Amino acid sequence: MGISIHPINLSIDTLYVLKGNQVIVNDGGANSNLGKFEKGLEQASIIPEEVNLILLTHGHWDHIASAKAIKQLNGAKILIHEDDLSLISETVPPPPPGLTTWGKFGNLLLRLYSPFLNFNPFEVDIALTDDEFSLDAFDIPGKIIHTPGHTKGSISVLMDNGEAFVGDLAMNMFPIRISPSLPIFGDDMEVVKDSWRKLLDMGVKTIYPAHGKPFPVEVMEKAIAYGKQGSEMIQAVEKVVLSC
């Protein structure tokens, strides 16, 4: 069964709409993006009622804030991992911790912005556990994998052909990242790397991040193997950029 991939840019995020016999949407985007979402569906020749599932890769505000509006538009089910349920219950979502020097600076900026988000909590239809979740019921040849590290409940969609939709487990958008690599925000970088080793062992080939364009898996293989010296070099570069 052929699956078509339709990226929809919503401000700083990219949602990926997967269309086969049914339609699922990866992530829900930031606030006030329903109009952009509808336009993206129209350009992909998809009517809103065709969407069956809104899959939230994690619970940060920029990935969930429009999910409720999208659900009201088409009645689709909302799915998230149970470990991130607490994040969607916050009226003032906490900013993600920084994992790098640049990420820590970004965290400070987000702390100033967070009180103005006015996020409305919502209910989910499917709360995942750590077990793999097949998408066969939605006619999508793939499965959901628990890939923590960015958040405790971060998940990725791994298609049977090796394409992986990883949310913020990787980032590829300036000024967040100069080039594709590991996230600058998250709970624990070592857990992030463990999740990547898990995906690599499962045969991932192409990475679709929520921030930035897709890229080949070899980039992440190098990032995982880069080691402490490479991380220190990256942080040194970030300090220079930050001081400019």
Image: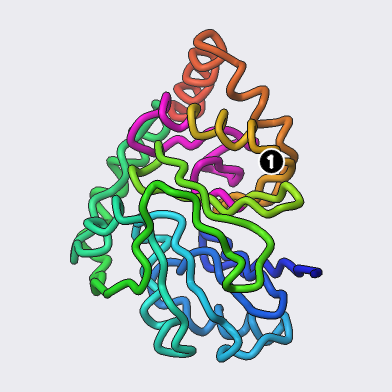
Name the one closer to the observer, 162 or 25.
162
Disc 1 marks which residue?
A: 204
**Residue shown at the point (42%, 83%) measured from the top left:** 71
**Residue shown at the point (69%, 41%) measured from the top left:** 204
On screen, residue 207 above or below 7: above
Q: Is residue 192 left or right of residue 199?
A: left
List x then y, in percent, for residue 134: 56, 59
List x then y, in percent, for residue 87: 26, 56
Magenta stretch contains residue 179: yes
Its colouring scheme is rainbow
List x then y, in percent, for residue 48: 57, 88
Q: What stretch is highlighted in magenta?
A: 165-192
Q: Which amino acid does label 1 sit on?
A: Val
Name the one closer to the observer, 126 or 240.
126
On screen, residue 91 above or below 179: below
On screen, residue 101 above or below 86: above
Magenta stretch contains residue 138: no
Give the residue at the far top of this rendering. Answer: 229
- Please tell me how crowded label 1 is: few (under 14), some (14-19), or many (20+) other residues with Cα within 10 Å: many
Q: Is residue 194 left or right of residue 72?
A: right
Mark 1 residue element: loop
Q: In which quarter of the image is residue 9?
A: bottom right
List x then y, in percent, for residue 192: 46, 32
**Residue shown at the point (64%, 33%) measured from the top left:** 200
